[in-house]
Amino acid sequence: MSTALLAPYACDPAQSRGRRFAEQAAPTRSDFQRDRDRIVHSTAFRRLVYKTQVFLNHEGDLFRTRLTHSLEVAQLGRSIARALGLNEDLVEAIALAHDLGHTPFGHAGQDALNACMAAHGGFEHNLQSLRVVDHLEERYPAFDGLNLTFESREGVLKHCARRHAEIINAQEPGGVAARFLNGTQPSLEAQLCNLADAIAYNAHDIDDGVRSGLLTLEQLQDVSLFARYHAQTLAEYPQLQGRRVLYETIRRMLSDQVYDVIHTTRAALDTHAPASADEARQCPPLVKFSAAMYEESKALKSFLFRNLYRHPQVMETTHWARDVVHDLFAVYLAQPQEMPAAYAQRSDVPRAVADYLSGMTDRFATREHARLTA
C-alpha cells in the first residue's frame, strides 16, 4: 500500500529494522510485499493445504485447513488494517506465515510433539514458525530460510516461553524475542493478526462444526454472540432456511466483531496517541475488542472447546493422531536413517526429528506411520 496512506503509528517499510542478511531493495515491491511473496512461494506454505485445522483433511473436502484458515486471517486482517491506517502488506505477510510451523493433526499433533520433546527443549508451533522462516526453508543460495524483515518475523513469533526467548535473545540481542523479556508489545500489525486469528477460527469452527453434524443451531442458542445475530437474521428473513441462515448469522457476527475492533482500537489510539510504530510498542496492547465483545468472544471459545474440540468424535481422531506422532518420533529417534539425509545427518537428532515431523502433512505422516510400524 502507499506509504502516504499509512498512519504515523503504522510500520513503514522504509523504516524497517531490516533483514538478518542485507539485500538490495526490490525495484517494484516494498520489503513487506517481498516478505509476503516469499511466504506464498515457500514449501511450508503449500503444505498447509493438507494440515488439519479441527477436522482431519480426509474427513471432508470443505472443512478448513491451515491454508484456508491463514487466508481468512489475512482477509480479516487487511480489512481492519485498511480502516486503521496500518500496513496491509505487513499484516498479510504475518497472517500467511503465522501457522507455518504447525504440526500435522492440529493441536493434537503439537501437544504430542511437545511431550516427545520434553527432555530436549520442548516444542512450540510459534517458535517453529520462526524456525521455518529463519532456517528450515531452503530456497536461496546465500542464506537459510526466507530472510524476512524484522517486522514480519516479530509478528510470526506470536508466543514464546521465557526460556526460549532468552536463548533467541542471546543469539539476537534486542531482536524478535526481546519483548517477551522486557514486557513491550509487538507492532500494531502483529497485534491485529493475533486478534484476526481468533476472530477467524471462532467463526469458521462454528461453520465446520455445524457442517460436520457435531454442533447444532439449537446448541448455539446458548452462545449470546451467535444467538443475537441468528435472531436478527430470522427477524429480517423469516423464510430463510438451510445453510443460508448459518452463513448470514456468521457474516453478521464477523462484521460486528470487525467493527468493534476498529472502534475500540481507534479509541485506544486516541488515548495513547503513539507518534510512531516504536512508540506503539511501548504502550499497552492497543488493538483489541471492547470489554463486552471480549467477554462474548471468550464465552464462544469456551463453548467450542467443550462442545466441538472435546466432542467424542473429535477426541477419537485426536487420540489416534497423538499415537501417530509418538510412534513416528520414537522410530526416527532410534533410526535417523529413516529420515532424509538433510535431517538424519544433523548432530541434534531430537530437534532434527521435531523439524522433520512438524513439517509433515496429515496424509504424509499417516503414510509414514503405516510404512514404519506395519
Image: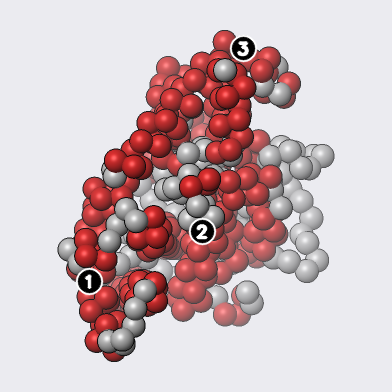
Q: Is residue 223 visible?
A: no
**How many residues crowd around disc 2 within 10 Å: few (fewer than 14), some, or many (20 or more)?**
few
The kind of residue tagged 1 is: Ala
Residue at numbered disc 1: 227
Q: CA distance from mark 2 to mark 1?
A: 24 Å
What secondary structure is marked by label 2?
A: loop
Please provide percent x and percent y for residue 316.
36, 36
Q: State which mark lies toward you, 2 or 1.
A: 2
**How many residues crowd around disc 3 within 10 Å: few (fewer than 14), some, or many (20 or more)?**
few
**Residue at (24, 86) in percent of width and height:** 235
Residue at numbered disc 3: 335
Q: Nearer the viewer, residue 155 or 246?
A: 246
* Residue 191 to residue 167: above or below: below
- Residue 251 occupies which quadrant of the picture? bottom left
Please provide percent x and percent y for residue 227.
22, 71
What secondary structure is marked by label 1?
A: helix
* Residue 324 to residue 10: above or below: above
Please provide percent x and percent y for residue 239.
31, 86
Residue at numbered disc 2: 62
* Residue 364 to residue 265: above or below: above
The kind of residue tagged 2 is: Leu
Q: State which mark lies toward you, 2 or 3.
A: 2
Q: Nearer the viewer, residue 154 or 211?
A: 211
Q: CA distance from mark 3 to mark 1?
A: 53 Å
